[in-house]
Image (cartoon, coloured by chain):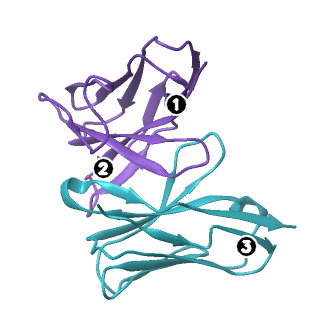
Amino acid sequence: SAVISQKPSRDICQRGTSLTIQCQVDSQVTMMFWYRQQPGQSLTLIATANQGSEATYESGFVIDKFPISRPNLTFSTLTVSNMSPEDSSIYLCSVEDNRGAYNEQFFGPGTRLTVL
Amino acid sequence: GQQLNQSPQSMFIQEGEDVSMNCTSSSIFNTWLWYKQDPGEGPVLLIALYKAGELTSNGRLTAQFGITRKDSFLNISASIPSDVGIYFCAGQYRGNKLVFGAGTILRVKS
């Protein structure tokens, strides 16, 4: 399976600031996604990171708040803008690995964000 | 939108016991996946199911894709302490997106 790394692994940020999270994959993948996991909750899809074009956002998530870049097939960034304590969550990137017979989706280790 | 109902919410079992958890939905999914998440880690894929009625095993884990494509179950046989964690079901829909169940917290008494 694809090996996924995220930076930073955790951060504590002040209200009103922004944080950019990086996701690096060890192989080229077509599909990359960003998820949010609020404390004690399940995972919710934020957006699909499209290579060479604007990300596709899910209902309730907007580009101004969560701008995403996808400059190539192995890298993506998610920025959490103008943060508030409600943004405290684990942010995870995932990739679809289609090297096998089927497309399977794997997750990075996550970035644990605390906003004060 | 798509929603998954995962049960039970939590389980506290004796080491060696078998475990069963399931997910249901009013929506049809093309793929069902089961993940396990340990504290401080991202979810790890345990089993993927691609065909209605499919029964798949991975060691002590067995999962089935419901014939209606609206449900799936995961069984863990002879539980061990390292099975502790949160188990999530996920259904894959258009654009290869995933919707997740609320999770089942598994605790094992040794």
Q: Is residue B13 visible?
A: yes
Q: Are marks 3 and 2 in contact (CB under 8 Å)?
A: no
Give the side of residue A54 with respect to residue A11, left or right: left
Instruction: Determine contact: label 3, label 1, CB under 8 Å.
Output: no
- Judged from the image, the secondary structure of the residue bearing numbered disc 3 is loop
Are tags 2 and 1 found on a single chain?
yes
User: Would residue A29 appear left or right of B81 to someone viewing this image?
Assistant: left
Give the residue number, with chain letter if any, for mark 2: A97
> Is A20 placed above or below B9 here?
above
Q: Amino acid at mark 2?
A: Asp
In this rendered view, identify the residue nearer to me: B62 or A14: A14
Identify the residue under disc 3.
Answer: B79
Res. B51 mark: none
Vertical side of B85 occupied by A20: above or below: above
Name above or below for residue A40 compared with residue A70. below
Chain letter for the purple part: A
CA gap between label 3 and label 2 equals 29 Å
Chain under numbered label 1: A
Provide residue A16's location: percent of width, then percent of height.
46, 12
Say few, some or many: other residues with alpha carbon within 10 Å of mark 3 (under 14 / 14 to 19 / 20 or more): many
Q: Position of residue A51 (x, y in %)?
A: 16, 32
